[in-house]
Image (spheres, rainbow, N blue to C red):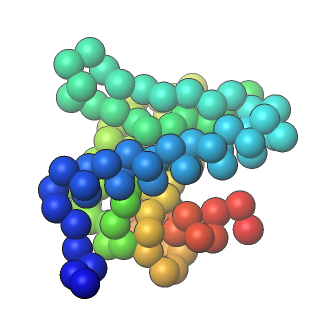
Amino acid sequence: MPKTVGKLNKTFLGQLFESLVYQSLATYTDICEAQLSHLRLRGGEKEIDFIVQKEDAIVAIEIKSKAKIEGKDVANLHWFEQKVKDEYDVVKVVINTGPYAYKRTDGVIVVPLALFGC
């Protein structure tokens, strides 16, 4: 049996992955008494999947249902940080399906969902 999925199923799997992450984030932010939100500009040209805020600290989170994270995957995180950095301390995170957690040279923290919450 092949280990790949068609394009339509790949999109659906990505949505399921994002929903699973949301479920975890909703639990963790409630425990920490933080706010969980989402940002999408009109027209959809810019989007941040999840924003966790507590006081003047923000964690901007992108969800990627793939193992390898590329520059285009973090572009909106950098854009968002530039918009709010004078007002908030921003941590940029990508939650993905990869096997390792690491910090990219551009400062983005990559965390596999399997390690999320550890």
Residue at the front extreme of this rendering: 1
Q: In which quarter of the image is the C terminus?
A: bottom right
Q: In which quarter of the image is residue 79?
A: top left
Residue at 35% of width from left, 55% of height from top?
13
Residue at 37% of width from left, 60% of height from top?
65
**Residue 24 left/right relative to 46:** right
Q: Nearer the viewer, residue 67 or 90?
A: 67
Q: In which quarter of the image is residue 33?
A: top right
Vertical placement of 95 versus 23: above or below? below
Q: Nearer the viewer, residue 47 or 16?
A: 16
**Residue 25 left/right relative to 71:** right
Residue at 24% of width from left, 25% of height from top?
44
Q: Can residue 60 be seen in this view?
A: no
Residue at the bottom extreme of this rendering: 1
**Residue 71 left/right relative to 7:** right
Q: Where is residue 105 in the image (x, y as percent from the top left)?
A: 39, 70
Residue at 68% of width from left, 28% of height from top?
35
Q: Which of 88 and 95 is in front in this view?
A: 95
Q: Where is residue 26 in the image (x, y as percent from the top left)?
A: 68, 38
Vertical placement of 36 versus 113: above or below? above
Q: Position of residue 23 (x, y in %)?
A: 63, 44
Q: Quadrant of residue 90?
A: top right
Residue at the top extreme of this rendering: 42
Q: Can residue 24 be seen in this view?
A: yes
Q: Number of callouts in the render? A: 0
Q: In which quarter of the image is the N terminus?
A: bottom left
Q: Which of 44 and 11 is in front in this view?
A: 11
